[in-house]
Image (tube, helix red, strand yellow):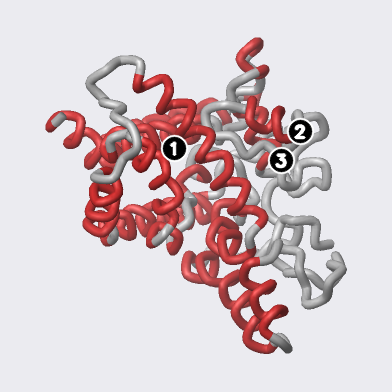
Amino acid sequence: MDRLNWLTENLYYLAIPYFLVAMAYEVWVLRSAKAAHFKGYDWRDSATSISLGIFNLVMRAAFAALTIWVSFAVYEHRLFELSPLVWWTWPILWLAEDFTFYWYHRASHRVRFMWADHVNHHSSQHYNLSTALRQPVIEMAWAWVLWLPLVLIGFHPVAVALAAGLNLLWQFWIHTESVRHIGVFERFMNTPSHHRAHHGSNPEYIDKNYGGWLIVWDKLFGTFAPETVPVRYGLVKNIDSFNPFKVITHEWAHMLAHAWNARGLGSKLRWVFGPPEYNGTEAPDTETASLFTSAGNK
């Protein structure tokens, strides 16, 4: 268990060489003649993405003690005993954690305050491995709470953290244009093709393909869209800035300003907890909804 705990605590740092080598290889591939039509890298954009990745790690470290304390406190009241030392615990946890990620990711697109942070990840108009590092920052203070039900069920907190970390590492490599399709795996796994569609601002791709490891949840719950037409990356209306602080704060500022000026408690709450396209009326007006959401605002 000590080794498992050490691996979990250092997983993201141990993965840094993997990130760097993979990005270097992708640059080489995308510069080849066969990949000349791909958008590739813009180093200003990639620098912004890497900066947000660093901020994400800082926030994880800042809230690590609280996360660990609460997780183990919940584990003391677990409903079942699902020991990480028993092999069959891991495939069950793999499915359960991926199911949790699907609903977290879906909520991150459909609940305004969650989208205000998740929008960072979709703000790049490029799609490459550096885009995968453009992670939410502020949500690191609270998003881990959504995984506590797994701990309450009986999965060890360290095992849950490791499963969540491995899920994110899987999603790193699917942020690429250099891998087009991978055959039969497209049917049940989340692949570069499926995730490219997820990052599209094309109407047919908006709010689709939320899966982590698996794409089956999207197929079961009606949020799947295959990659058909060329993907237009970024937001419906892009912010056109490489300033990391603007990327992090632009949608928070927009949301909070409208919530502050809204009339009535109900409208204020809907600006924060409603869908991103909410614009202060019961019927969303797609012309005047948030300038920065990817939820069909224009």
**Could you tell me if the residues under marks 1 and 2 are in contact, i.e. CB atoms within 8 Å?**
no
Q: Earlier in the sequence, mark 2 or mark 3?
A: 3
Left or right: residue 212 versus residue 58 is right
Which amino acid type is shown beneath numbered disc 2? Ala
Q: Secondary structure at mark 3?
A: loop
Q: Which residue is mark 3?
A: 208
According to the picture, the residue beneath numbered tag 1 turns out to be 168
Question: Disc 3 residue type?
Answer: Lys
Secondary-structure class at tag 1: helix
Above/below status of 22 relative to 279: above
Which residue does the image show at 19% across and 36% down from the upper left? 5
Question: Between 88 and 1, which is closer to the camera in this rendering?
Answer: 88
Say whether disc 1 or disc 2 marks the residue closer to the N-terminus. Answer: 1
Q: Residue at 63% across / 64% down in the picture?
A: 112
- 234 with respect to 16 (left or right): right
Q: Position of residue 174 (x, y in %)?
A: 54, 31
Q: Are marks 2 and 3 in contact (CB under 8 Å)?
A: yes
For residue 225, which numbered disc appears in the image?
Answer: 2
Density class for disc 1 (Cα within 10 Å; few <14, some 14-19, many ≥20) is some
Separation (CA) of disc 1 from disc 3 = 18 Å
In the image, taking residue 261 as reference, residue 138 lies left or right, namely left
Q: In terms of sequence position, does the residue under pointer 1 or pointer 3 come before the other?
A: 1
Q: Give the CA separation, mark 2 to mark 3.
A: 6 Å
The residue at the point 33 percent across, 53 percent down is 57
| Residue nearest the viewer, comparing 270 with 261 | 270
Name the residue located 29 percent from the left edge and 59 percent from the top edge.
Answer: 63
